[in-house]
Amino acid sequence: MVKLQEKIDHQNNLKLLSQMAATIAHEIRNPMTSINGFIELLKINSTEENKKYLSIIKSELDRMDQILSEILYLSKPVERQFEVVSVAKIINEIKEIMSPLANFHNITIDLKIDKPSDSNILGNPNRIKQMLMNLVKNGIEEMCQGGSITISLKNVKEKIQIIVCDEGRGIEKEDIPNLFKPYFTTKKDGTGLGLQLVKQVVEEHDGIIYVKSTLNVGTSFVVELPTNM
């Protein structure tokens, strides 16, 4: 009974923290919208040098907005509104969306899709897309010298396997068990929320995720999702 009560109290605390996080995120976003509007107005009559500074401010605001999006996502209750989803189609969309950012960092995105017609699952397409975007973005941030990110899709018995493999610096062995813990990060400017978001999406779809990494060679995030519909 004591353990059960502790679990209930823990869940209630998490719920309260989620509500607080959502409220704070919304309150921060309101002035950010105003600031973005004033930045666009200031650009009209600014010198080229001042426009450069305004662009930096805008870039930092965009980063703040992304962090707030992750906080809001994690604070939402699970919405299991599923439909038949083609994972192969989503992966092709991810390549199209993320390629401009990857190209800017001298990185290519390669696809290896096994039997795209057999990649249908029951899922939420927006959540799966957000999960994969986070994994690809994570790979881009780990590759300072350029290279390639490979997204593979395989059929394994009654599961599909999605592998996002980068050629980055790799992850220390002792850090791997902590990767999906909230606020844990190995990056200087990281929030520790991106991979927590990824894990949440995988669990919503009754899947699993694990990591393989070799220092100075690269890292692979492997996601397995059930195909039974």
Image (spheres, rainbow, N blue to C red):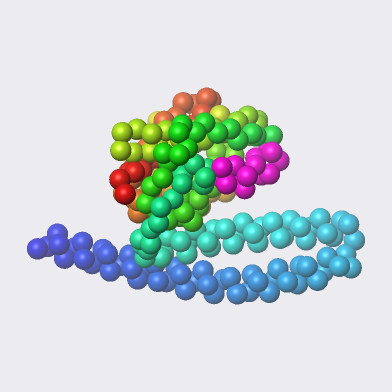
Residue shown at the point (47%, 64%) measured from the top left = 72
Image quarter of the N terminus: bottom left
Between residues 76 and 82, which one lies in front from this camera angle? Answer: 82
- The quarter holding residue 13 reads bottom left
Residue 96: say if magenta. Answer: yes
Q: Which residues are magenta?
A: 92-105
Residue 80: say if magenta. Answer: no
Position of 168 with respect to 105 (left or right) is: left
Q: Is residue 94 above or below residue 127?
A: above
Residue lying at the far front of the rendered structure: 117
- The quarter holding residue 118 reads top left
Between residues 92 and 223, which one lies in front from this camera angle? Answer: 92
Q: Is residue 213 above or below residue 123?
A: above
| Residue 107 at x, y percent in the picture | 65, 34
| Residue 78 at x, y percent in the picture | 36, 62
Position of 133 with respect to 13 (left or right) is: right
Position of 114 with respect to 122 (left or right) is: right
> Is residue 167 shown to the viewer in this render?
yes
Q: Is residue 146 above or below residue 63?
A: above
Residue shown at the point (82%, 69%) measured from the top left = 42
